[in-house]
Image (cartoon, grey):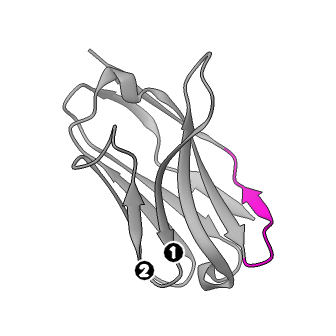
């Protein structure tokens, strides 16, 4: 089970940190990721971190968003310099070694101009 939190309403240029709490060790998964889905758009990958610690971020958020992990059960998404186009529901997801994918519930991020 994945539990995302930390969303909210923020002005453009502001910051938020999203948290994803897993019920099992995140090292049980191959990749942990943050996705987002804006109204009328497809869900897209925002950032990911592998079990080995390699990270990747989408070009649209590169330099502004950072994915990290703390202990064995927490993954974070630090979001700086937020823009109105970052407004979306953000989801935490985990890719298992066997190819399965697990989704957490979303957390709403709204950036006002």
C-alpha span from label 2 to label 1: 5 Å
Residue 97 higher or lower than 83, as above or below: below
- Assess whether mark 1 and mark 2 are in contact (beta carbons under 8 angstroms): yes
Residue at image coords 53%, 81%: 51
Residue at image coords 21%, 49%: 63
Residue 11: quadrant of the picture? top left
Describe the element under mark 1 as helix, strand or loop.
Answer: strand
Residue 89: quadrant of the picture? top right
Q: Is 46 within the magenta?
A: no
Q: Residues within 10 Å of mark 1 (few under 14, many from 20)?
A: some
Describe the element under mark 2 as helix, strand or loop.
Answer: loop
- Picture coordinates of residue 98, whole percent (x, y): 80, 76
Frontmost residue, 22 versus 33: 33
Residue 1 higher or lower than 24, as above or below: above
Of the 4 image quadrants, the one containing the N terminus is: bottom right
Frontmost residue, 70 versus 50: 50
- Picture coordinates of residue 47, whole percent (x, y): 45, 54
Q: Is 99 within the magenta?
A: yes
Residue 50 image label: 1
Residue holding disc 2: 53
- Picture coordinates of residue 41, whole percent (x, y): 60, 22
Residue at image coords 80%, 65%: 100
Report the magenta residues as a range.
97-105
Q: Residues within 10 Å of mark 2 (few under 14, many from 20)?
A: few
Residue 29 higher or lower than 35, as above or below: below
Q: Is residue 68 visible?
A: no
Q: Is residue 73 left or right of residue 77?
A: right
């Amino acid at each position: 089970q994945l539990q995302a939190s930390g969303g909210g309403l923020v002005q453009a240029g502001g910051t938020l940190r999203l948290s994803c709490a897993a019920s099992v060790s995140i090292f049980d998964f191959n990749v942990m990721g943050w996705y987002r889905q804006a109204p009328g758009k497809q869900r897209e990958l925002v950032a990911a971190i592998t079990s080995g610690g390699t990270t990747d971020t989408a070009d649209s958020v590169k330099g502004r968003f950072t994915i990290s992990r703390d202990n064995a059960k927490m993954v974070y998404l630090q979001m700086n310099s937020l823009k109105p186009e970052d407004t979306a529901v953000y989801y935490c997801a985990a890719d298992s070694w066997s190819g399965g994918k697990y989704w957490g519930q979303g957390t709403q991020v709204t950036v006002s101009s």
